[in-house]
Amino acid sequence: MKKVDISISGKTYSINCPEEEVDKLNAASDYVNDFIQNLHQQAPKLSHENLLVLCCLNLYEKIHTQENLDKSSAMDNKQTEELLDKIINDANSML
């Protein structure tokens, strides 16, 4: 584990992180900072706390949407495999 200092919206946080994930943590920090900055530009009068809450809610929505897409894709893949199996079985029965 490595102690990493990251800055989120101007505040520094010390986080213990596996060394092989430090780059991902820094990338996540950059992403969140950019996201908060964009929110702040859209609503400059929001407090720091409200910006963080909106950021969390938006990130949750993105995660939830991606999970739904992943589930849908998995279902599509399963249906495709079942259709291909049926086609192969039908073709084999004709031979």
Image (spheres, helix red, strand yellow):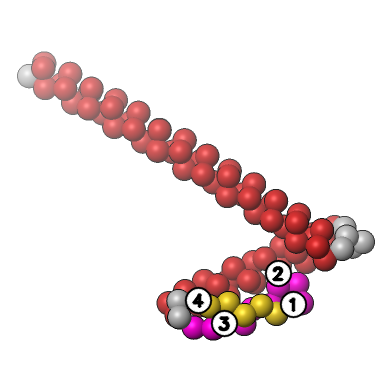
Which residue in the rendered view is the most extreme toward the top?
94
Q: Residues within 10 Å of mark 2 (few under 14, many from 20)?
A: some
Alpha carbon of mark 4 to alpha carbon of mark 1: how far? 18 Å
Left or right of 81 on screen, residue 26? right
Alpha carbon of mark 3 to alpha carbon of mark 2: how far? 16 Å
Left or right of 95 on screen, residue 55? right
Judging by the rendered image, the residue that carries numbered circle 4 is 17
Give the SS element for disc 2.
helix
Amino acid found under the numbered disc labelled 4: Cys
In the rendered structure, find residue 33 and report the number of the disc placed on it: 2
Q: What residue sits 50% from the left and 76% below the top?
A: 17
Front disc: 1 or 2: 1
Up-down: is 7 above or below 57?
below
Give the SS element for disc 1.
strand
Q: Nearer the viewer, residue 29 or 3?
A: 3
Judging by the rendered image, the residue that carries numbered circle 3 is 4
Q: Earlier in the sequence, mark 2 or mark 4?
A: 4
The chief SS type of the magenta part is: strand
Q: Earlier in the sequence, mark 1 or mark 2?
A: 1
Give the SS element for disc 4.
strand
What are the residue bounds of the magenta stretch? 2-10
Q: Earlier in the sequence, mark 3 or mark 4?
A: 3
Front disc: 2 or 4: 4
Judging by the rendered image, the residue that carries numbered circle 1 is 11
In the rendered structure, find residue 32 and report the number of the disc placed on it: none
Q: Is residue 6 magenta?
A: yes
Give the x, y percent position of residue 65.
58, 43
Q: Earlier in the sequence, mark 3 or mark 2?
A: 3
Left or right of 41 on screen, residue 19? left
Q: Are marks 3 and 1 in contact (CB under 8 Å)?
A: no
Amino acid found under the numbered disc labelled 2: Asn
